[in-house]
Image (spheres, rainbow, N blue to C red):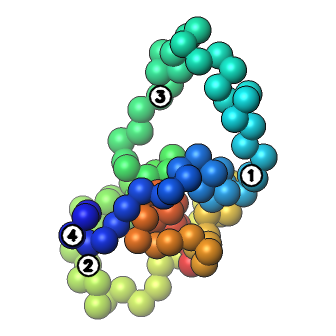
Amino acid sequence: MVKANVSAPKDGLQTYTSILGDDSLDMDLLLGNVATYYEITRNYFKIHAACAHIHSSIDALEEILHEKALPPQDIRKVLVKTYLEASKLKKNKSLDPNETLPIKHYLLS
């Protein structure tokens, strides 16, 4: 990734919440219970290195490609039907596409 000039966002939490359309990150609320319990015990684990909202789209693509190999030049258009929250994940022109976090959220352009 370094060779491809891809880096982490300079302000990962702010970038992440802005991708999801929420600019109201409250650091005091976020850090208020640090070291009193561990969130990992209440977490789930994803099978794709992307936003959970686009996992079903990735799964569908994998299923299609498993059934029939499609060279990229044979694909003219991809239509994705999804639920409301996933449909909000559009390219944000103000985000750097060379950073890993924003590209894991691109579903629609």
The kind of residue on which mark 1 rests is: Asp
Q: Earlier in the sequence, mark 3 or mark 4?
A: 4
Crowd rating for badge 4 (residues with CA inside 10 Å; few <14, some 14–19, many 20+): few
Query: How far apart in space, not on screen, are marks 1 and 3 (Cα)?
Result: 22 Å
Q: Is residue 52 left or right of residue 92?
A: left
Can you tell which of label 2 and label 3 is closer to the viewer?
Answer: 3
Q: Nearer the viewer, residue 78 or 29?
A: 29
Q: Residue at x 67, y 29 (%)?
A: 30
SS at circle 2: loop
Residue 92, quarter of picture:
bottom right
Q: Is residue 16 left or right of residue 78?
A: right
The kind of residue on which mark 2 rests is: Leu
Location of the C terminus (image quadrant): bottom right
Q: Residue at x 31, y 71 (%)?
A: 5
Q: Residue at x 64, y 26 (%)?
A: 31
SS at circle 3: loop
SS at circle 4: loop
Query: How far apart in space, not on screen, are marks 4 and 1 (Cα)?
Result: 32 Å
Does 75 sit above or below residue 35?
below
- Residue 3 - label: 4
Can you tell which of label 3 and label 4 is closer to the viewer?
Answer: 4
Q: Nearer the viewer, residue 101 or 10?
A: 10
The kind of residue on which mark 3 rests is: Tyr
For disc 3, the marked residue is 44
Q: Residue at x 34, y 66 (%)?
A: 6
Q: Earlier in the sequence, mark 1 or mark 3?
A: 1
